Image: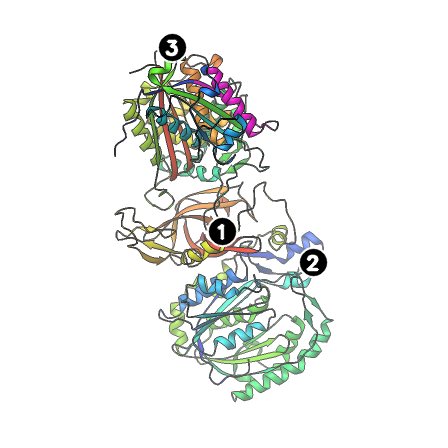
Amino acid sequence: MGYCPHMTGIVAYGTHIPYWRLQRGAITTSLGAGGGKGERAVASFDQDTTSMAVEAGRVALRNASANWVPASLWFATTNPAYLDKTNANTIHAALSLPASTIAFDTIGSVRSGVAAMMGAGNGNAIAILSDIRTGLPGGSDESNGGDAAAAFCFGDEGVIAEVIGGASATVEFTDRWRQPGETASKQWEERFGEHAYAPLVDNAFSDALKSANLAPGDVGHAIFSGLHTRAVKTAVKACGVAGESVADDLSAAIGNAGTAQWGVMLADVLDRAEPGQIIAVVLLADGVNVWLLRTTDAITKYRARQVAELTVRGQIAAGRNDLTYAQFLTWRGFLHREPPRRPEPDRPAGPPSLRSQAWKYGLYGSRDESGFVYLPPARISMKSGSIDQMEMVRMADVQATIATYTVDRLAYSMSPPVVAAVIDFDGGGRFQCELTDVDPASVKIGDRVEMTFRRLYTVDGIHNYFWKAKPVRV
Amino acid sequence: MASHGIRDKVAIIGMGCTNFGEHWDKSTDDMLIESSDAALKNAGVNLDDIDAFWLGTMGSGLSGLTLSRPLKIQHKPVTHVENYCATGSEAFRNACYAVASGAYDVVMAIGVEKLKDSGYSGLVVSAPADDGTKATVTAPASFSLLAPAYAKKYGVDESELKQVLTRIAWKNHRNGALNPRAQFKKEVPMETIACSPLVAGPLGIFDCSGVSDGSAAAIIVRAEDAHKYTDRPLYVKALSFVAGPAAGPIDPAYDYTTFDEVVHSADDAYSQAGITDPRAELAMAEVHDCFTPTELVLMEDLGFAERGTAWKEVLSGTYDLDGELPVNPDGGLKSFGHPIGASGLRMLFECWTQLRGEAGARQIKSIADGKTRALTHNLGGAPGACVSFVSVVGTELD
């Protein structure tokens, strides 16, 4: 995050904290070791870093002004769903961005998130940081990790936090590493990383303050982030920022979301910051990056647009913390369970998926002259018989009501049983889909639901992304 | 829309039906040979006498060769038809039309399905390549959607509805216990049915039809020729088949307590057959009880009960073997089993057996009371998106 004089400011942001929480004590109970206090956020079996990025992006776009369209989309994660194929394109499609908006992946290391933010910060663009953190059972990465995503829209108009300075330090050292395809990282002796990071923190932080003519005491909110817990703690002490200004790293509530950690922390700070406050972001990831922001008067108006349930604290409060450790291990692929005696679904085919892109990714239906909405989009009106007299309508952000439902204990699923429902959208349109983030026993006809972008299953290495409904939690 | 029907133009002169069940030792070919041979012998004709064939199977073979190869049919037309779970009925319907048209004198409709070679639980259907957005629910889950919707609409509480569904399964098992060809030839106590492991929604394993192998066949001739072959032919009174716009899953007006397609095909069939009060006029009905809620809803769609009252009729035994209108006297899909392509013809086989007074221990008494007509109902698909077939057959010419 070297200071870039042309950098625009943050105009909107949004996060996604998954519904499920694993109590760290559940690990201790099962293994007799590991675990600890508090909870970690857990991406559901039908989520990956791409689908979580979509959810965070949707919140950000909902908060952005209606006519704001990004020229580019930057996606960062350590845990991409695909290599070779650009994951950001899936996000681009699900957010229904125009083809002229270019989409990029910056993937592999936690530091990739900085590239995404710098890339997006050069214009009208959106950066989305998303991560699912895994580690071997009983290890600290497993219990301290967390899954989350954060999205930031940059632009020149309606800036709520402007970029006022920054600095960075880059040095090669072996602290944490992982071979592609492995599910867990390894780390050098902890005190070595602390030793390597300490001088870089000192240099980058003081350089950043100098770039903006600030003193440590001017910082209203300091965000310290990184996977090296001990080095981060040392950095907090070394920077000389007042204790009450140090932002909560949310590790007790959701864990450390790797690439997305500082994004979620920054969103949490922006959820509460007053106009004119200085925010310092200090990221320890293969070097140090410091970024200085100042909130503007526009943040007050912005906050009035936000929905309380979609703030970081709102999403943390809405979580469900009775996920079993066995289920957690199953979802992350560490426990291979007996599948139902049913065939695997077929892989989604490329040509039909391209033809139905607006439907599959954008959740567009078609509306005929009488106002009837067809899901998926139809060409012929059931009422008049007219052909191709339809208008496309996006249903992704429309709420719906359950007309009827069932719990399918036979269907193939990574996490049976499948809860299927017929839902009627407000203003027209009926759709039969799966429910997710739901307790099968609590579903009732008349329940309110909203749409969420998920990974249904993976066959032949192809992820089948589509939409499910989840209960509206207000 | 014109639907003139072919009332009394064609007749069934012989039928055959294999036992239904898990035929680990029989192939599709074996079952086709067995049911066709039984039908030919029953009609007193030879394979060479058959002018054309209609073969119904959903997944046990492609093309007419599936039949001509094992039967060694010598250069005759063999048509393969598929229409989901109503495939067997569709083979029968088209065979009847071919005779009625005058194109052929003697034809065979035959249905077969080999489900138990797949190695999976339940029905496995292969679909064309798609975008992966179609709902992935299983058949029991699709049909279980009827249960909460029906209960809510008519103010039946959940436990009461479970009793109704249980009684339907109990009745069909009880009938099947008297049927030597049935997959499940035994009565099942209500508490066993009610407490069986859940499959989908309120449906337990005993609420689902049997997944089985089997085959059934019919020989059809012009009505005026029927007595050359048998003293007791069955005349075809009505054949109705409709495909709906599959709008239930997309139309909020659909409430999951009815099959519109069934209502339409029943109206059409009753009009073709001249039936105005089906409950009073029919001797019996074979209906598509793929899952217990289906049979419940069908009682209303077929006009056997007023809307919202079928659940009470079920509890009071109206559709029992000795009830006012016996439904599924052979045990139905529930206990006879449901080899897809064979089921529609299996239903006709029970009409053939009952109307001719050959049903033995499960013989219904309405025949003795002078009722001469029976109905079959066969559907394919799911609530709100299905195809439906209704036929009426009878022993007398009108």
Q: Note whether residue B19 is visible.
A: no
Query: Contact (CB < 8 A) between labels 2 and 3?
Result: no
Residue B114: percent from the left, percent from the top? 54, 32
Residue most toward the front?
Answer: B75
* Pointer 3 chain: B
Colour scheme used in the picture? rainbow
Query: Contact (CB < 8 A) between labels 1 and 3?
Result: no
Residue B230: percent from the left, percent from the top? 41, 12
Label ID, residue A138: 2
Nearer to us in this view, A404 or A245: A404
Q: Nearer the viewer, mark 2 or mark 3?
A: 3
Q: Is residue B201 above or below residue A296?
A: above
Neighbours of disc 2 within 10 Å: few (<14), some (14-19), many (20+): some
Query: Contact (CB < 8 A) between labels 2 and 1?
Result: no
Check if mark 1 and mark 3 are on a common chain. no
| Residue pointed to by mark 1 | A436
**Which quadrant of the structure image shows residue B350?**
top left
| Label 2: element kind | loop
In the rendered structure, the answer to whether residue A381 lies left or right of residue A354 reads: left
